[in-house]
Image (cartoon, helix red, strand yellow):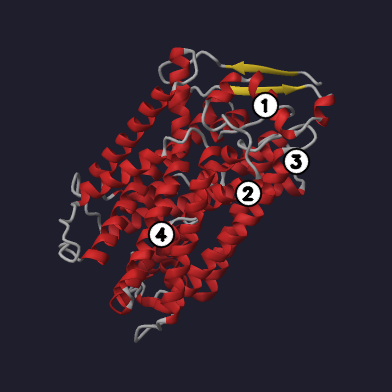
Amino acid sequence: MGEVAAEIANSTLDDNAVFTEPTHLVIVITTGSIADESTAEAAAAARDANPLDGWLPITESRDGSTVSAVVHLLCSGLGIQALMLPVAFASLGWVWGIITLSIGFLWQLYTIWALVELHESVPRTRYSRFLHLSIAAFGPRLGKLLALFPVMYLSGGTCVMLIINGGRAMEDLFKTMCGGDGAACGIKPLDGVEWFLLFTCIAIVIAQLPNLNSIATVSLFGAIAAVGYGALIWILSVTKGRPEGVSYEPLIEAKSVEARIGSVLNAIGIIALSFRGHNLVLEIQGTLPSTPKCSSKESMWRAVIIAYSLIALCLYSLAIGGFWAYGSKIPNGGLYVAFPQFHGHDTPKLVMGLTYLLIVASCLSAFQIYAMPAFDNLELRYIGIRNCRCSRRARTFLRVFFGCLTFFVAVALPFLGSLAPLIGGMTSTLTFVIPCFMWLMIKRPRRKSGKWWLNVGLGWLGVVLWVVMVAAAIWVLVDRGINANFFDP
């Protein structure tokens, strides 16, 4: 059998090791008869030779499959942001809306492909965390500078937003089924903080599953819920007919050149923010087995094709169906606000309740996968201090601590959704920019070749998009203002 050796670099962790000194795991594989062993045996041997990699929740289990990768990608890639797409179409119109959505989808699909290829691009090495790959491509200082904030926000910040959205969906579910005062059910309604707390408690209970591979069933339910509520909303919106006076002329409400430009930039930002989950692609691929005979990138790319075919179907259905149903009358809150506003009175309570229930289920499931990088970093700090595997009690404490922290931020900043376009625009480099430059730094294609021009062009175009998204978010905040209701959900 071939020999499997492990080298763990940077094993000494300082007090800031959680987010600043990630342990770099390098697996050196000498090819031999191991190529003829089963995938499971090879993965087990790799775990035995790399105890630290086997102690952390992202890579603790590498027994995943294409099916588990598909449900993880669906759960992380479909979110409530997709309900905002008709708002973008209201500013861009049919033609430019579809063109912009198509370009954005193909662009982010290419960067996903690049990440899948780069996961094992260095011989005998697996990069199962985005930050590690960034450091390998750009060096310790620049790699952390480029990737640290996006990775941190897209883990912890997304969990905060899921608490806010999930808690409010719970409240809407209660109001739909029991009335605003709860008289129909004989139950006193909860206030905003209590709904956030209820959602967080359920999320923390589910979060006790040990590792990323073990939450595949949760991701399955989350994927079904995300596809389900999206389908319910756009199908019901289309079948119930359009409100009177619907117009499909773009920029119908713009009163000046400045307002039109701001509206177009905001629409581009909305479309760009509908693509999510890039910060988890390498982590999901890290759950798949890989041997010299069968690399993980084949099964991962197969999962990407399946998952993003379904995601594309959902995005285009919501964008086209939602814009057809409401046109220029679509409110700033998107389909989440438009459907109950125009059709809530003639839709059965059970259907409305089912829609909100699916949104809650989707948020709970997405919380688990987006929290996993944070759990991984917290346990990395624990291992660095104690120099031993994280016990079940310690793991439970760390996850409860993370849940309490995100709950506190959600209560303290319940208006974070208003800032999401700005912060999301600042982190959009992780989706559209960094993977292209990673490809250039690691693969080093021949200068001025086709692949070189493609990645250079997309990378710098992504920088321009980043500027556009941040500018659009600032314009929207200035134009509409922000209700900074601290500690008042």
Q: Residues within 10 Å of mark 4 (few under 14, many from 20)?
A: many
Among numbered discs 1 and 4, the one appearing first in the sequence: 1
Do labels 1 and 2 touch, CB within 8 Å? no
Q: Mark 3 or mark 1, which is nearer to you?
A: 1
For the residue pair 42 and 16, the one nearer the viewer reads as 42
x, y percent for residue 5: 71, 17
Q: Can residue 332 be seen in the rendering of this structure?
A: no
For the residue pair 202 and 10, the one nearer the viewer reads as 202
- Hey, which quadrant is residue 18 in on the image? top left
- Hey, which quadrant is residue 38 in on the image? top right
Among numbered discs 3 and 2, the one appearing first in the sequence: 2
Find the distance from the CA under tag 3 to the CA under tag 2: 38 Å
Do labels 3 and 1 touch, CB within 8 Å? no
The type of residue carrying mark 1 is Ala
Where 93 sits versus 416, above or below? below
The type of residue carrying mark 4 is Leu
Q: Which mark is residue 67?
A: 2
For the residue pair 27 and 395, the one nearer the viewer reads as 395
Find the distance from the CA under tag 3 to the CA under tag 4: 49 Å
Residue appearing at x 39%, y 77% in the figure: 326
Q: Which residue is mark 3?
A: 447
Do labels 3 and 2 touch, CB within 8 Å? no
x, y percent for residue 113: 66, 47
Please indicate whether residue 78 sits to the left or right of residue 328 in the image. Answer: right
Q: Which residue is mark 4?
A: 358
Secondary structure beneath disc 1?
Answer: helix
Find the distance from the CA under tag 4 to the CA under tag 2: 22 Å
Q: Which residue is mark 1?
A: 44
